[in-house]
Amino acid sequence: MVARPARLTPPLECVRLFDADAQLDGIIAIHSTALGPGAGGCRFWSYPDMDDALDDALRLAEGMSYKNALAGLPFGGAKAVLRRPEGDFDRAALFRAFGRAVEALGGLYVTAEDVGTTVADMQEIAGVTRHVAGLPPAEGRAGGDPSPWTARGVFESMRVAAGHVFDRDLGALTVAVQGTGNVGADLCRRLAEAGAQLIIADPNPARRDRLQHILGARVVDVADIAAVDADIFAPCALGGALTDASVDAMKARLVCGAANNQLAAPDVAARMLERGITYVPDYVANAGGIISVSAEYLGEDEEHVAARVGAIAPRVATLLERAAREKRSPALVADEMAEEVIANAGREAA
Ligand code: NAD
C-alpha cells in the first residue's frame, strides 16, 4: 500500500513564551479553531533545545485537532510545551507567568494538565485566567485529574479491539504496558481486574515496583518492552514508541495505548498493516482526558463525561471494522473521519 504523506500543516498561530524572571520558556501552538477554541494540555519537560520543543508542540497540537474532532467536542486543537528549567526554580511563579500568556490569548487557547504538570499547577494558572481546566471538581461537576477517564477509554477500546483481533476476552491475553505513570498504572489496575497478564516497564522504580507487588506484573527493561512476548502492546509513556524497528521486532498483534503521537512517522502505520498488527489510533482511544477537561471548562456534569467516554469503544469498533473491510490502516481511516468533521465545521461556518 502507498504510504500517506506526513499530515503536518502549518499551525494557525504559534506563540513563543519567554519570561526570564519567571524562568518561563516555551510555546503555545494553536493548530485549528474550526470547531471552537484550541484545547490541549500543557507539557512540562526537559527539552534539549527550542527546536525539539517546537516540534513536539506542533505535532501535539495537530493531534489535538484530530482527537477533539473525532470525540465530537466543540474545540479545536492546541498544545503548550514548556521547557523545564535546570536546577532550582519557582514553580508557582513559572505557571502564573504561563497563565498570563494564556489569558493574553483571550480564550483562543484552553489549557489543562499533560505530562509533567499537576492539578496544583492548574490552580496557579487559574489565579490569572479562566481559560484552564483540570482543577479540583465542584460537587457533581466534571473536573479534576483527567487520567482515570483516559485510562477508562483506553481500557474499553482495548477490550473491543481484542474482541476484533483475537475474538477473546482480555482475561485470556497478555498486555505489555510501556510507562506506568498516571494513565498506565490505572490501565494496569483495570487490566489486572479483568484477569489479563501484565508485563510492564518504566524507568521510575517507584512507579513500576508498586505495580509489580500489588498486581503481580512482570517487570522488564524499558528497552525490551515493545518486543516482549505479549498479545497487546500498550504505549503509555511518551510519543514515538512505534518506529520501523520497534514494529519489526514486535510480537504483539494489537497496539492500543494512551500515549499521544505513538507513530514516530506516519508511514509506520503502513508497516504495521503489512506485519498484521492492528493499531488503534492513539487519539481515538485516549480522548477520555480531553473529554473530561472540556466538560469541566463548559460547566457540564460527570454524566456528560461518562456518556462521551462510553462512546469511544463503539467508535473504535466501527473504525476497526471499516479499516479491515477496506484493507487500510485504522490510522488513515481515523484521520479521514476527523478531517471530514473539521472540514464540515468550516463549511457550516462559511
Ligand atoms: P505520566 O508522566 O504520569 O506517566 C508517564 C510515565 O512514563 C512515567 O512514569 C515515566 O517514568 C514513564 N516513561 C518515560 N519514558 C519511558 C520509557 N522509555 N519507557 C517506559 N516508561 C517511560 O503521564 P500520563 O499522564 O500517564 O500520560 C502518559 C501518556 O498518555 C502521555 O503520552 C500523555 O501525553 C498521554 N495522555 C495522557 C492523558 C491524561 O489524561 N493524563 C490523556 C491523553 C493522553
Image (cartoon, rainbow, N blue to C red):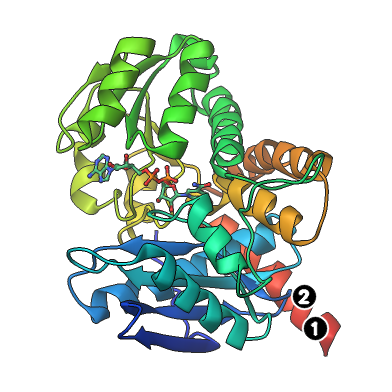
* Label 1: how many Cα within 10 Å (few below 14, some 14–19, many 20+): few
* Label drawn at residue 240: none
Secondary structure, mark 2, is helix
Q: Residue at x 58, y 34 (%)?
A: 157
Quarter of the rendering occupied by the N terminus: bottom left
Position in image of residue 131 (x %, y %) = 66, 71
- Three-letter amino acid code at the position of disc 1: Arg
Q: Check disc 2 and report the residue beneath it.
A: 344
**Whole-percent x and y of residue 94?**
40, 72
Q: Is mark 1 on a helix, strand or loop?
A: helix
So how many labels did they put on this image?
2
**Are the residues at dot 2 and dot 1 in contact (C-beta closer than 8 Å)?**
yes
* Residue 256 appears in the figure: no
Q: State the mark number for residue 347.
A: 1
Residue drawn at 18 percent across, 25 percent down = 220
State ligand 1's quadrant.
Answer: top left
Against 311, residue 27 (above or below) is: below
| C-alpha separation, residue under disc 2 versus residue under disc 1 | 5 Å
> At which x and y percent is residue 330?
52, 50
**Would you say 300 lies left or right of 25 here?**
right
Q: Can residue 154 be seen in this view?
A: yes
Which quarter shows the C terminus?
Answer: bottom right
- Across and down, in percent, residue 135 comes to 63, 53
In the image, taking residue 102 as reference, residue 28 lies left or right, namely left
Q: Which residue is drawn at 26% across and 28% down?
A: 206
User: As rendered, which of 271 and 264 lies closer to the eye?
Assistant: 264
User: Does 21 sit above or below residue 42?
Assistant: below
Task: Tell me the amino acid under the disc marked 2.
Answer: Asn
